[in-house]
Amino acid sequence: TLLVLDFGSQYSHLITRCLRGLSLYSEMLPCTTKLSELSFKPKGIILSGGPYSVYDADAPHADPAFFDLGVPILGVCYGMQEIAWRLSKENVARSNEREYGQANIMSQRHNSPVDRLFEGLEDAMQVWMSHGDKLNQLPEGFCTIATTQNSPFAGIAHKEQPIFGIQFHPEVTHTPRGKDLLRNFAVRICGAKANWSMSNFCDQEITRIRNLVGPKAQVIGAVSGGVDSTVAAKLLKEAIGSRFHAVLVDNGVMRMNECQQVKQTLAEHLGISLTVVDASQRFLDGLKGTEDPEKKRKFIGNTFIDIFEEEALKIEKKAENTPNAGKVEWFLQGTLYPDVIESISFKGPSQTIKTHHNVGGLPQRMIDGQGLKLIEPLRELFKDEVRQLGRQLGVHEDLVMRHPFPGPGIAIRIIGEVTPDRVRIARQADHIFIGMIREAGLYNEISQAYAGLDTNKAVGVMGDQRQEGYIIILRAVRTTDFMTAEAYPFSMDFLMNVSRRIVNEVDGVALVTYNVTSKPPSTIELQ
Ligand code: XMP
C-alpha cells in the first residue's frame, strides 16, 4: 500500500485515482494523521499539494515520524515545500505571485539512484504548475533533477535517500507524462506491485464485510435505486445473504414512479427483496416552511436515520425465533469518495461545500458510535469505479449507467420551500426532460440531468391571459468524477422542444431555462 497524505489540494484525490488506474493500491489520509495511527506500513509516501503557504500560522505539517520511517517520499508542490521547509525555513521563499498553468521542464540525469523518477521519460516535458511559494535554494543533501525557465528547482532529489520533491502536479491530465512519473515512483522506487484490480477489491470487500459483521448480526441498508446503493446492496447480499435487509424510504421527493420501479428491478434482477417504507407525508410535513438548503439536507438526513432505526427494530422483532435472529447492528450506505472529500475534508467546516446527507448530515449519535454502526464499502471509490464493481457483480448495464440521484432528492432541486404541488411540477418536468434525453439517445453521453424548479414566479401569457408560473431550470452535465462538470451542449432545437412540452404539459410552469454554468463555480445540484 502506498500512502497519500492529503494537504488539501483540489487535486489530491487524483493522485490516488491515478495510482489505482495503474493497478497500484493506495490510501489517502488527512495530513494530520500520525504514523502511530496507521494500520499498515506504507511502501512509500506521497505528500500532496495544498492551498497553504508553509509560513501560515495554521499551515498543516506532517508527523515527523513519517520522515524517519526510511520509505521513499515524494512531495508534490506544497509537499515539496514541506520537505524543504522541515530541513531549513530558509529553503522556501514566500511569494505573493502564483505560477499557474502550463510550463516546460527539463529533467537532468545524475547516473545515481535518484534518476529513476524520470526514467523512460523525455528530458523535456510539459507539466502543470499551480503554486505560490517556491524553493529559493536547494535543501542540504539534495540535487536538482528538473528545472523550468521560472524555477531552477522544479524537481529535487536527495543525493542518497529516496526523497523527492516536484513543484508541478503529475496527477492532472495537463501533465501528460505525469502518470508515468507516478508509476516510476511507486514501482521503480518504492517497489510497489501493480496487482490491484476490481475483482480483487470485490473479493476482499466481501470477506472484509463478512468478518466485520460477524456470524449473527444483521445489516439494514438504505437503497435508493441508484447505482451506488444498488452495488453496495449487492455486495452485502453476497457477503451475508438474508441477514441483509434492503429498505427504500419514500421521502416524498423521489422521482416519478421511482419506488415501485426500484422494488421491481431489485427483486427481479438481483434477487434482493426490498421493503418500501412510505414516509412521504412525514417528510413533506417536516419540510414545510424550510427554505435553507442545509436545513433541508439536515432534516431529511436525520429523519432518514430515525426511520431506519425504527425499521431495524421491526426487523429484529420479525426475526425472533428464526435462524436469522440477531441484532440489527449495522447500517449500510453507498457513500462514495467524492462525498467524503466534499463533506469532511480536513480543511474543516469552513470549507465544507455541502453536507451530503450520507456523510456530513448524519446525526451525532451515529458518529459517536451509538445506535447503528455505519458500513460504507464504497467509501474509497469514484463513480466510474463503482460502475466497474457493479459489472463485476453482474449488475445490469441499465442500472450501472443510471444517473446519480441525491439522497435529499427533489428537495434540493427546488429553490425555496418544498410543497407537494412544487414537487409534482418538478417531477413531471423531470420526467419529460429525461424521457426526451433517452429518446434522443443522449442518456449515456450525459453524466447527470434533471429538471429543477425556482419558486419565484415569472409572468407569462396563455390564451391572451396573464399567467404567473414557476421557472423550470434544466441541468445536464458531463463529468467523470462529479467534482468538476461541464454543461452538456444540447442543440437549441432540442432545448426548445423540451421547453415547449414542459410548458404545455405541466400545469404551473411559465418558463424553462437551461443552466449552462460549469462546476466550479456552480454545483451540479441547484442547492
Ligand atoms: P453537487 O451538487 O455537490 O453534486 O455538485 C455532486 C454530486 O453529488 C450528488 N449529491 C448528493 N448525493 N446526498 C447524496 O446522496 C446529497 O446530499 C447530495 N448532494 C449532492 C449530486 O447529485 C451529484 O451527483
Image (cartoon, rainbow, N blue to C red):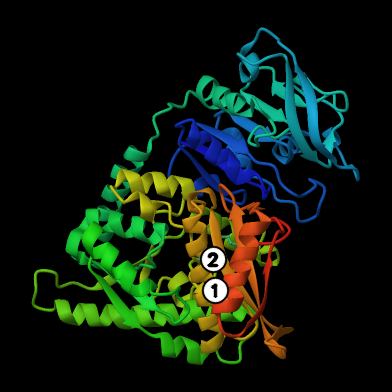
Q: Please state which of residues 116 and 452 is positioned toward the viewer in this rendering.
A: 452
Which amino acid type is marked by label 1?
Ala
- Residue 523 image position (x, y, % from top left): 66, 62
- Residue matched to label 1: 429
| Residues packed near mark 2 inside 10 Å, few (<14), some (14 to 19) or many (20 plus) | many
- The verdict on label 2 being within 8 Å of ligand 1 is no
Q: Residue at x 58, y 45 (%)?
A: 13
Q: Residue furthest front?
A: 463
Task: Please indicate whether residue 290 sits to the left or right of residue 106 in the image.
Answer: left
Does any portion of residue 493 appear in the rendered image?
A: yes
Q: Residue at x 39, y 52 (%)?
A: 400
- Residue matched to label 2: 433
Does any portion of residue 527 appear in the rendered image?
A: no
Task: Please indicate whether residue 352 sits to the left or right of residue 321 in the image.
Answer: right
Q: Please state which of residues 248 and 48 is positioned toward the viewer in this rendering.
A: 248
Task: Please indicate whether residue 205 sits to the left or right of residue 497 in the image.
Answer: left
| Contact between labelled residues 1 and 2, with CB atoms less than 8 Å apart | yes
